[in-house]
Image (cartoon, rainbow, N blue to C red):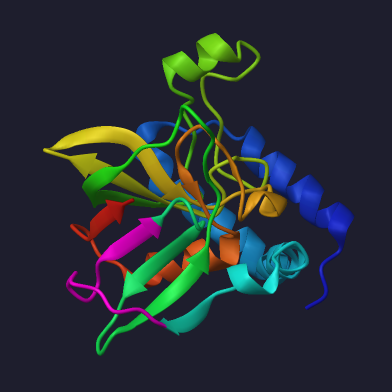
Amino acid sequence: MKINRRIFLNGVASLMAMPVVAARADDASDQLEDFFDKHGAKNFLKDRDRNYIPPQFRRQSVYYPSNEKPGTIIIDTAKRFLYLVGEDSQALRYGVGVGRAGFAWKGRASIQRKAKWPTWYPPAPMRRRQPELPVFMAGGINNPLGARAMYLYKGGRDTLYRIHGTNQPWSIGKALSSGCVRMINSDVEDLYTRVKMGTVVKVT
């Protein structure tokens, strides 16, 4: 189904205007999913994203020997790649955007929360640096977290770092974020379906 851009954007705006409370977060994300499915918006977003991604940052299977267990995520911040470790020295490689100088985080953590079309609560330090930011933003195409988010915890505590989608696909392969790892929406949706709660994430 070919999307009518005006209908799509107007519809998303009306959905984003709906009040969303924590208890209804799942309902709100389901409504977004239903709307995007109905109007072909997922294909619209994926086609747009592909135009920005150089070949080396497109999702692909690669030879990747590793001592980590299959199912582990390894993020190479220097090369801007995320690897999902597989069997027999293979991995699924995705291009990512990473934290700019002074905001990069390295270490081991695990995924303890996953969300579709997540809401965004900019951390207080970020809002102090950028006072124009909202305290809260509902999920949707204008949300910086994009289509999916996976939340990294260490020692039972939220690290405040996430693997998430983006509404700035041109940023993949660059170091521009405030520390989080961003992926194009089609890639973060793909990764979201492949990983489970408790997945180990190693950031180097």
Snapshot quadrant of residue 194: bottom left
Q: In this view, does 167 lie to the left or right of 99?
A: right
161 w.r.t. 114: above or below? above
Tell whether 36 sits left or right of 125. Answer: right
Pick the residue in front: 142 or 183: 183
The residue furthest bottom is 88
Indicate the position of residue 155 as horizontal and vertical percent values.
Answer: 11, 38
Could you tell me which residue is drawn at 55 percent across and 60 percent down?
33
Closest to the observer: 128 or 103? 103
Query: What count of labels does the image hold?
Result: 0
Residue at x 40%, y 49% (from the top left corner): 26
Which stretch is magenta?
Answer: 63-75
Q: Is residue 92 left or right of residue 129?
A: left
Would you say the magenta stretch is mainly helix, strand or loop? loop
For the N terminus, which image quadrant? bottom right
Choose between 16 and 188: the one closer to the eye.
188
- Looking at the image, which residue is at 75% across and 70% down? 47
The reply to whether the magenta stretch includes residue 27 is no
Question: Please, is residue 201 above or below residue 21 in the view?
Answer: below
Residue 17 horizontal/vertical position (percent): 65, 33
Horizontal arrangement in the rendering, residue 67 relative to residue 128 (left or right):
left
Whole-percent x, y for residue 204 in the image:
33, 51
Residue appearing at x 49%, y 25% in the figure: 122
Q: Position of residue 102 (x, y in %)?
A: 47, 27
Relative to 62, is 114 above or below?
A: above
